[in-house]
Each structure stands twice: as C-alpha cells, then as structure tokens.
Amino acid sequence: MQTSIVENLKERALGFWENITQKSNEDEIAGIGRERIIVFIVAFILAVCLWFMVNLSLNYTLNINLPIEKGMMPDDRALTKAL
C-alpha cells in the first residue's frame, strides 16, 4: 500500500517535471501573448472610462474672491449693510 502511494507521487512529480521542461510551441505562446495584450488594452480602456465617469460626475465647489463696488444707487435708497 505504501509503495503504491510513493510510486504514484513519483509519477506525478516526473510528469510535472516533464511538463515544465518540455519545449513549448512558439506559435501558441505568441497567440496567448496577443490575447493577453488585447485583454489588457480592453481592461485599461474600460478602467479609464469608469475613472472618468466617477470623477467627472462629482460636484466641485470653486470659491473666488472678487471685489464688490456699489454703483448706480438711486438717491432715495440707502444700503442697510456695509459691502
């Protein structure tokens, strides 16, 4: 019983090692590389679009200090508060 488990593990390890060390097909790798690049570009464009939607949908407040001058006040009227 113990030898079959050990031999089973040995066969799995050897199979794993052969998969790692075997030469790969360059066409398959190039195809996978192209797919990964396309997926990355699509995901990047989607992320940028979502980022713009989130950031541009917010309300922004801008405070500007401008001097106020009174002008063209009628003679029969008066200001109640100082400018």
Image: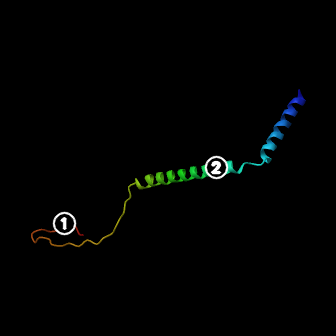
Q: In the rendered view, does 27 fall on the left or right side of 11?
A: left
* Quadrant of the image containing the N terminus: top right
Amino acid of disc 1: Thr
**Front in this rendered view, residue 46 or 35:** 35
Query: Residue 7, image x and y in percent?
Result: 87, 33
Residue furthest to the right in view is 3
Q: Give the Cα separation between the discs numbered 2 and 1.
A: 79 Å
Q: Residue at x 25, y 71 (%)?
A: 68
Query: Residue 19, image x and y in percent?
Result: 78, 43
Of mark 2 and mark 1, the one earlier in the sequence is 2
Amino acid of disc 2: Gly
Q: Label 2: which residue? A: 31
Q: In the rendered view, does 22 fall on the left or right side of 32?
A: right
Which colour assignment does the render follow? rainbow
Question: Helix, strand, or loop for circle 1?
Answer: loop
**Front in this rendered view, residue 52 or 38:** 38
Residue furthest to the left in view is 76
**Front in this rendered view, residue 26 or 72:** 26
Mark number, residue 80: 1
Is label 2 or label 1 in front? 2
Q: In the rendered view, does 6 fall on the left or right side of 66?
A: right
**Front in this rendered view, residue 42 or 3:** 42
Question: Helix, strand, or loop for circle 2?
Answer: helix
- Position of 37 relative to 3 (above/below): below
Where is residue 78, by image quadrant? Answer: bottom left
- Position of 54 relative to 10 (above/below): below
